[in-house]
Image (spheres, rainbow, N blue to C red):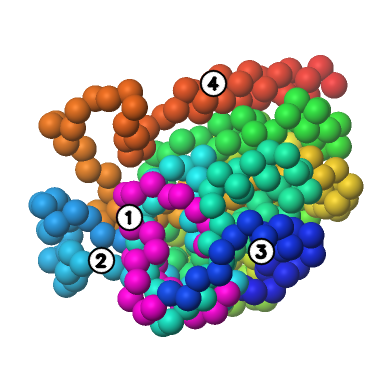
Amino acid sequence: MAKVLLNSLSSSDIDWMVSAGTRKHIPPNTVLIRQGEPLHGLYILLDGSIAVTVSQPSDNPLGHAFAVLEGGKMSGREIARLDSGEMIGEMPLLETSLSSTTIKTVTKSLVLSIPQHRLLGKLQEDESFAAHLYRAIAILLANRLEKIISQLGNNSTIALCEPQIREILFVFGELSDLDIDWMVSVGTPQNLSAGTVLIHAGKAIDALHILLDGKMTVSISEDKNDFLARAFSSLEDSESESSEQEFAWVLKGDIVGETPFVEVPLPFVTVRAVENSVVLSIPQWRLAAKLMHDIGFAARFYKVLAILLADKQQQIISQFSYGRLRYSKEQPLDENSIYENELSSHFLAQMTLAGNRFDWMLKKIIRS
């Protein structure tokens, strides 16, 4: 993971982070971030190892029930082990204020701690730094998501079928009008009949797709390691003999095909239309060139990917009762308090803006 930071950040980015941060030697078994508490800074793990765990408060009966069924204890369940080069505490940079996991050192570790307010100011005033840091966060989150899925097993994919805040709100809320106008100008609308496969497991992805209308499903094959056989069977338009398990829906406004931009290996999932659908397909090479030459677009695009990946990670954590939110009837309502899962006024404004932009995109595509 150290290569992700070195490949994503420039020398000036690293120099600023070193000057703004503080190097700290942390003893083993030290909690850096506690689940359910606000995050105040970003940690970069320079050396050592940390564990990511999720748990439910000890007085929650549902958490006790699930812990007993799974043969575990309420002390927490480890879902990932992170090594040097990882970033921890990045969620406030993605507009999430409370931590959904507990982060604890496993061995003696060396971290660079950067205050949150310094980072937020730098991200607002320096688009180049923002593009580089959000890209690094997106890549690290993509790799972390794979680790968590591997650690928890196939059951973790079930969470992605649960109701969630629509991706349309993230995508069209963060991108600018000019960004969307460019995507419409370079993209090609495609009509897909029910049953058409848009992305084949094991095959390279050549475009980013935005679903304009219809519904699609994401499935994983039981023999997900046999990429070569499945890729060539898809080329021959023959059905794979292995069974597939559906684990997510793609709905209007969602995007698929983003994995090449977060350096994830060939996809092990298949995306298929379950009803007549329309997608806007943006060639990967056009998007890659745009990201290289338009630093403002790159900053917004990679932030969107990071938000989407963080949301998927949260869904998986929440499916196990350990990570589910607890609500108390006795919790007082206070406008100055921070509540878990609370929607800010900024987010609600983004929802309206995102919906308007998506409708504008559809009208422009129809006119052209």
Please tell me how many numbered marks the rendered image carries. 4
Which residue: 71% across, 19% down?
360
Magenta stretch?
Answer: 27-53
Return the residue at label 3.
Answer: 18
- Amino acid type indicated by mark 4: Ala
Q: Nearer the viewer, residue 283 or 61?
A: 61
Return the residue at label 1.
Answer: 35
Which residue: 68% across, 39% down?
124
Q: Nearer the viewer, mark 4 or mark 1?
A: 1
Instruction: Point out the tag, 4 or 3, that comes first from the N-terminus.
Output: 3
Q: Residues within 10 Å of mark 3 (few under 14, many from 20)?
A: some
Instruction: Point out the tag, 3 or 1, that comes first from the N-terminus.
Output: 3
| Residue 204 numbered mark, or none | none
Return the residue at label 2.
Answer: 76
Q: Is residue 95 visible?
A: yes
Return the residue at label 4.
Answer: 349
Instruction: Point out the tag, 4 or 1, that comes first from the N-terminus.
Output: 1
